Amino acid sequence: MKYKSVFDIIGPVMIGPSSSHTAGAARIGRVARNLFGREPEWAEIYLYGSFAKTYKGHGTDVALVGGLLDFDTFDERIKQSLNLAALKKMKISFHEEEAVPDHPNTAKLVIGDSKGELELVGISIGGGKIEITELNGFKLRLSGHHPAILVVHDDRFGAIANVANILSKHEMNIGHMEVSRKEKGKMALMVIEVDQNIDDAVITEIEGLPYITQVARIVD
Amino acid sequence: MFRNVAELVEMAETQQKKISTIMIEQEIEITGRTREQIMKQMETNLEVMEKAVERGLEGVKSVSGLTGGDAVLMQEYIKKGNFLSGEVLLDAVSKAVATNEVNAAMGTICATPTAGSAGVVPGTLFAVQKKLKPSHEQKIEFLFTSGAFGFVVANNASISGAAGGCQAEVGSAAGMAAAAIVEMAGGTPAQCAEAMAITLKNMLGLVCDPVAGLVEVPCVKRNAMGAANAMVAADMALAGIKSRIPCDEVISAMFKIGQSMPSALRETGEGGLADTPTGRALAAKIFGMPLTQE
């Protein structure tokens, strides 16, 4: 079941005009920012399907950038986000893509700064609910509605078990987990959705484990 | 956990509970949150809806200038007393329009189930309350009942205009509202399902064809008619009229119709009303101006 909570249906509280094209877009932008861990200095935003055709009318562009600025769906500042980003000298460009995506509301965000970059593909499936389908080339499914930990690691024995042990020690319940890798023995990604909020201590402990490259947290 | 309307109605009947109670209990079970937390969040959503209607009834204008002010016109018309249909019905229409005019003006609303269809549920709720005089708790329950039916549609079909057309948005919203009106008026869970089925049947095939891609024309008036449709279907169900096609099958038909709709009629702003001479002229005029500043 894609929709689990009644508040996916009666909600979110948001700035208009479109739950999928405005609220969902803000959420995709915000997840990208959270995963990046800081405010990006630049963003290349690729819009597909209905997003590409109607983004101006729906404020999808404004909302995606609002999300990159860490604004929630109901934050009135969303309306001014393009101006606010310009004031912060954030370089943003939009690309209307012709390719037909699997889902009509698809956006690809490539964001970065002098220290690194991140590429993310998100879809807005209706009523403000989103899924993240790709991160740095990895296919994944992330609802964005539960706290989640993303761990980039080397594909080695015990890497997954070590992370699970830490979560178990902190009495954290795993609701959904996915592991994918680019090639056997190379870079891999763990996506762990949990029921509880994730303390800094947990993140620090996971970062200290062998074979772990990068740890990011997404808070509900 | 209920997966379809039949299971939802059966749970309510065998446990002798209201649909809203079943939805609240499922929410507690799924999320692990307390009843108080859940009720509080829905109360906040109710307050957002009340404020949006108030703001719309004061009169708003969208940035494009395409919509705004119709909710006020309707209220003034009701006050004159010469209306032909009914006061509660027209009040629902006015309040649905008020909400969507605020939405189009990039104001704060609560999506029910989406922003483009956010007028129908609160519009009908704040209209029928004058007649039914519900308690504060019953108003919150109204939202859980509509949420329960929307939950089934979202999981078995779609609530996205881009995926399923306007029938998936305003159609779903109207069905949700009809069911919630029936519960508030003292109807049975089965009658709630009949109201939802009758409403949605009359929304089947409705395309999503927004002029200039904006959630304004025809969205605002479709919310008006969604509210009217919900009110009439609720009365029909309360009168004992039944849908020959069961509610779950209507939902499934809606999903299939959405899948066979061409992309031009699914929120791309390319077909239907968007593709009329006036629609195209408006789009050309609007895209020459910034839409993001108030």
Image: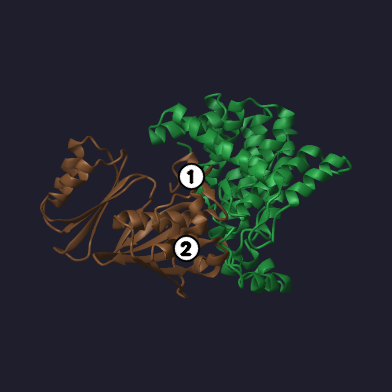
Chain colours: A brown, B green
Residue B199, x across and y down, in percent: 68, 46
Side (left or right) of A112 relative to A92:
left
In the displayed structure, A133 sits above or below B231; it is below
Residue A126, x across and y down, in percent: 50, 54
Q: Chain of mark 1?
A: A
Amino acid residing under circle 1:
Asp
Q: Residue B294 lies in what quarter of the image?
A: bottom right
User: Is residue A124 among the parts visible in the rendering?
Assistant: no
Q: Residue at x 61, y 71 (%)?
A: B287
Is residue A34 or residue B153 the one in the foreground? A34
Amino acid residing under circle 2:
Leu
Q: Quadrant of the C terminus of chain A?
A: top left
Q: Residue at x 47, y 32 (%)?
A: B38
User: Is residue B150 among the parts visible in the rendering?
Assistant: yes
For label 1, the SS is helix
Farthest front residue? A87
Query: Residue under circle 1?
Result: A8
For label 2, the SS is helix
Mark sitting on residue B95: none
Q: Chain of mark 2?
A: A
In the displayed structure, A160 sits above or below B89; it is below
- Determine the CA span between mark 2 and mark 1: 28 Å
Query: Residue under circle 2?
Result: A82
In the displayed structure, B133 sits above or below A154; it is above
Q: Residue at x 61, y 46 (%)?
A: B173
Side (left or right) of B46 relative to A155:
right
Side (left or right) of B235 relative to A122:
right
Residue A13, x across and y down, in percent: 52, 45
